Amino acid sequence: MLDSLFANVASYFASLKLSALLRALPGGLAQGLIWGILALGVFMTFRMLGVSDLTVDGSMATGGAVCIMLVLSGVNPQLALLASFLAGMIAGVVTGFLHTRLGIPDILAGILTQISLYSINLNIMGKANQAVNVNKVVFLFTSNAKVLTRTIWIVFGVCLALILALYMYLGTEHGSALRATGINGNMARAQGINTNRMKVIGLALSNGLVALSGGVMSQYQGFADVKMGTGAIVIGLAAVIIGEVLGEALLGKHMNFFIRLSFVVLGSVIYYVVYVFVLWLKFPPDDMKLLTAVVVAIFLAVPNLRTAKKNSFNRLAKQNAKAAKLGKEG
Amino acid sequence: MLEIKNIYKTFNAGTINEKKALQNLSLTLQDGDFCTVIGGNGAGKSTMLNAVSGVWPVDSGSILIDGEDISGLCEYKRAPFLGRVFQDPMTGTAADMQIIENLALASLRGQKRSMFRWGVPKADTEKYREMLKTLDLGLEDRLTTKVGLLSGGQRQALTLLMATLQKPKLLLLDEHTAALDPKTAAKVLEATQRIVEQNHLTTLMITHNMRDAIAYGNRLIMMYDGHIVVDVSGEQKKNLTVEQLLNLFVQASGSNEVNDKLILS
């Protein structure tokens, strides 16, 4: 029996081809960078506004749907991406309206927009998915293996430009007001900041980036699917958190805001490289979302568990019991 | 300067928790008045300040600043007129931002915030450093420190500075030293006195310390049951003792139940 186990293990490792991994890595890198755009959007709401915005799952697919449908109707692909960005902003404004004007809790407001976007995305595309004949349309963000390196450089450039733009915006008077809104609404209002408006602007910017990411992704894969955004918020959070943990570990206090934003994109790239690696290990693709959720849960839990370990009643009880026992014996 | 005319505010109206917080409250402050406010728990002191700040609209009545009716304006729209320091040191500042970022935010209180100007102009650094120096808390060397790392007293002093960076028409202090240890509280009060005098600010200061209420300012009001029951100023206030103040309260409110907290503090 042991023999057969060894044989199985041996054949498993024999089936893993290093060349296959190397072939898959550039694609992982490109997708990681594309999801990095989405991660920047998630960072805006999750870290700057302190809101967990679930609109993301819907607005990513909206970005893809808008881009593909416009390209199909003959619009310039780059112009279509701009439209994706604007469509995402509208989705963000809707969530912001539900939250700030109608008083619906932020998470619920996001879920409502997300679920309504599912129908809207189906209406945009007319069916569950739409593809573009990539031999007819030249995409800047194509996954075509021949020009993949170029695609990676272009997405890298886009990420860098977006990081720079966010860095500059959040450093302005307006951007500072947005950050203050997320940190302390009472203080912001006392300084004359319209916190409701700031939240809507933040949600719009965030979902604009998310939809842009969806648009780029649809160009990369050559199609848009109504389900392409499912679980996007979790992947975005994973990227933000992986980036933060890594940045903290590598740079600690030397991290400035520009590097902090860069680590968000880096977190996304790392997520996708690991994703490719795990798939290469023949992990069932159907279980990837479960794995992602577990990874995010662990990363979110670690800081809390660390403090909980220090501030534990159990630990103190054990410590005192031990001391008492030693006292008796001595 | 400030005119509060017959304002009413009832919380949870029509329910078992109904609380008539303000009842026909009126108050007029002259330009440069430094008015201290005392009263027991639930007398309506903080409610009055929140009404002036616009945290929520009052049920009826009007609030005027410099003759302009502001009672219909929401909280952030009243910010140009008001400098505020809160009871909780966490409330007045943004913890996750640097000292200088907080000051820069406050320097634009009530103004349009541009997308094309840096939030923290380099040119203002020296100005802020000088201002922080006057607080004598060692903050002038920590301009880029996150405010969350400061002590409660430091945060209150910083909030005070932020509230007065742009001269407000009215300074509202809501028990801003209540959460501090006695020594720090004295320091913050001292700074308050100095800033108010230097800038000739019209000020409303809630305190639960009767001695402070007597020692500071040129006018003292005591609230009970949502309105003002004692109002002393000028010479009469200067010669006031805690005992006299308690007697005034009993006379005015017609009740012997002087709040424990009122006596103890």
Image (cartoon, coloured by chain):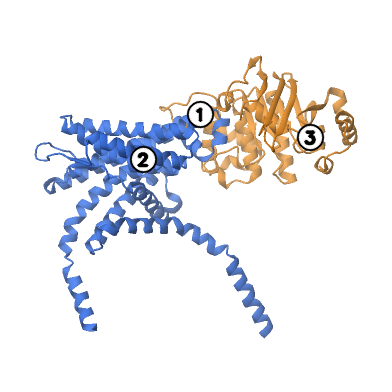
Chain colours: A blue, B orange
Which class describes the residues within 10 Å of circle 3: few (<14), some (14-19), or many (20+)? many
Question: What residue is disc 3 on?
Answer: B39
Label 3: state its secondary structure.
strand
Question: What residue is disc 1 on?
Answer: A194
Q: Is residue A192 left or right of residue B261?
A: left
From mark 1 to mark 2, how far is it between C-alphas? 26 Å
Kind of residue sitting beneath label 1: Asn
- Vertical placement of A18 versus B71: above or below? below
Residue A46 rendering spot, x and y as whole percentages: 43, 44
Question: What residue is disc 2 on?
Answer: A114
Residue B1 rendering spot, x and y as whole percentages: 69, 18
Q: Residue at x 21, y 41 (%)?
A: A129
3 and 2 marks in contact (CB < 8 Å): no
- Vertical placement of A315 versus A65: above or below? below
Kind of residue sitting beneath label 2: Gln
Q: Is residue A95 left or right of residue B165?
A: left
The chain under label 2 reads A
From mark 3 to mark 2, how far is it between C-alphas? 50 Å
Label 2: state its secondary structure.
helix
Q: Quadrant of residue A17?
A: bottom left
Q: Quadrant of the C terminus of chain B?
A: top right
